[in-house]
Amino acid sequence: MAVGAGRKYGDIQPLDSFNRELLAHVHPSGWTNPRARERYHLVVVGAGTAGRVCASAAAGLGASVALVERHLMGGDCLNVGCVPSKALIRAARSWHAARESAASFGGPAATGDGDFGAVMQRMRSLRAAISQIDGAPRYTTLGVDVFFGDARFTSAKSIEVEGQTLRFRRAVVATGARAAVPEAPGLAEAGYRTNETIFELTTLPKRLLVVGAGPIGCELAQAFARFGSAVTVLNRAARILPRDDADAAAIVERAMMRDGVTFQHNAVLKSVELNGGDKVVRFERKGASHSAPCDEILIAAGRAPNVEGLGLESAGIAYGERGVTADDSLRTTNARVFAAGDIASSYQFTHMADAHARIVITNALFPGRSRASKLVVPWTTYTSPEVAHTGVTAEDVAASRQAVDTFTTPLHDVDRARLDGEDEGFLRVYLKKGTDKILGATLVAEHAGDMISEITLAISSGLGLGKVGAAIHPYPTQAEVFRKTADSWRRTKLTQRIKKLLSAYFRWVR
């Protein structure tokens, strides 16, 4: 439901065969809503990741379930988030590798321009193929009553959609979030794109200006720079990726600059105006006024919860600027209603929405005691190199003043990283002081997102760094960085006293 607040059905471009196939699954033309049952065990509002997992799991357990979506099933992830963005990022990496092949590996020289239209067509094709998993026809076969339309709470235990009343024993608000658009004179008139519309491009903009240097802004800025756009990033903060370790962010920023991205830090967007065919963005930096002409503007400056028009007040559900208010069990201020996903979390990731949904099923349909605070949450920014993180960060450590031991292993010390030409990065692990208990880790590597789960599993299972290092890691792989970091910790156990005892032992056994 995060997709398309205010957008109408079919408002997706270009309306080619692939997008028609997408719509046939996620919002079929002429869909007739089922007749509402007298009462549902569970009514879910929003068919993004959290909503769909709630609905399919509950139906699979035998509960009667209604799932309501106002625009496109699959939510952000399928339609305007993870799926399309990662398709673009993979293509951009391929283009970059082709250009670098001759200089880095003695490969053939790449010449000429690539076909950006083909990149976008491939993305639409893949998205359409994946959409059948998330679509209304499939969920109907799972036993879920799928309703399209605007959902509105009419009481503490009922929801209205398209003239029908859905009464429920329990309900879930899973309406997600959308791009937050800053107020700037002339921005609306000049036109801009967000993650909802950037993937509708069919031609590469010569000049792209990105507002925001968080994960979405950085990922897409680097991808478009690798495709050949001249990319400028306006960043209100002093550095990119403020939720990650500063030196991890610095590595990514240097890589993006090598790819041609220009950064304007401590920059505040002031206004936009049209000048001929240019969109001229005016911003302030360190008290001075500046301007930057561009062809397209991408707004990636944070997220806003989708709470409007839901009638939350009628159901006694509290909400604020950050979304719906929910406790650690994900129950809202209405004991019958739960919230899951981006609407109720500062961790706005697809995998977090999935984890939330599993908590909701346990707590809403059964007398469960699952808690969101118990989750060990990894996240990855899919730049090149990637930054993956799990558990505490350097900022968390500093804020809590918790005593920790920190171990950092440069990727340059890992043979496979050097052989791959991907040795700019590191693994940093935070341990409870004097122990091998893992509190958190940050990994900067080309495939950090694929690797970080080893540490997430260790934390969630209570395995110390010693156990991680004791596992045999195949050589040569970049995952050997975990063993090397464990070896660094193990060497600290060899105190002067132990060294003296060992020396005495070996003198005795000669």
Image: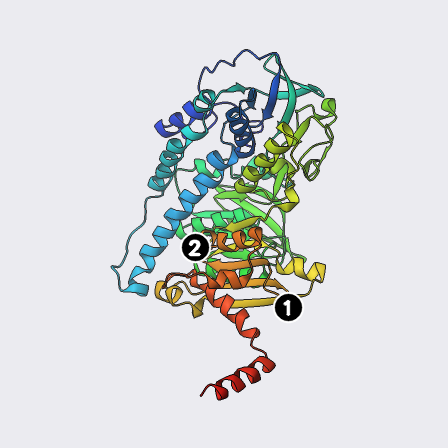
Where in the figure is residue 197, as x and y percent of width and height? Answer: 49, 36
Residue at mark 1: 434
Quarter of the image with the N terminus is: top right
Q: In this rendering, would 337 be left or right of 202? A: right
Where in the figure is residue 87, as x and y percent of width and height? Answer: 40, 43
Confirm whether residue 460 shows in the render.
yes
Tell me the crowding category of disc 2: few under 14, some 14 to 19, or many 20 or more residues within 10 angstroms, Cα based: many
Quarter of the image with the C terminus is: bottom left
**CA separation in Å, label 1 and label 2:** 30 Å
- Asked if residue 17 is positioned above or below residue 98 in the image, the reply reads above
**What is the residue that sits farthest to the front in this orientation?**
509
Where in the figure is residue 247, as x and y percent of width and height? Answer: 56, 64
- Asked if residue 344 is positioned above or below residue 168 in the image, the reply reads below
Q: Which amino acid does label 2 sit on?
A: His
Confirm whether residue 13 shows in the render.
no
Frontmost of labels 1 and 2 is: 1
Mark 2 lies on a secondary structure that is loop
Residue at mark 2: 447
Q: What residue type is labelled 1?
A: Gly
Q: In which quarter of the image is residue 244?
A: bottom right
Q: Nearer the viewer, residue 202 or 443?
A: 443
Where in the figure is residue 339, as x and y percent of width and height? Answer: 64, 32
- Asked if residue 122 is positioned above or below residue 470 in the image, the reply reads above
Mark 1 lies on a secondary structure that is loop
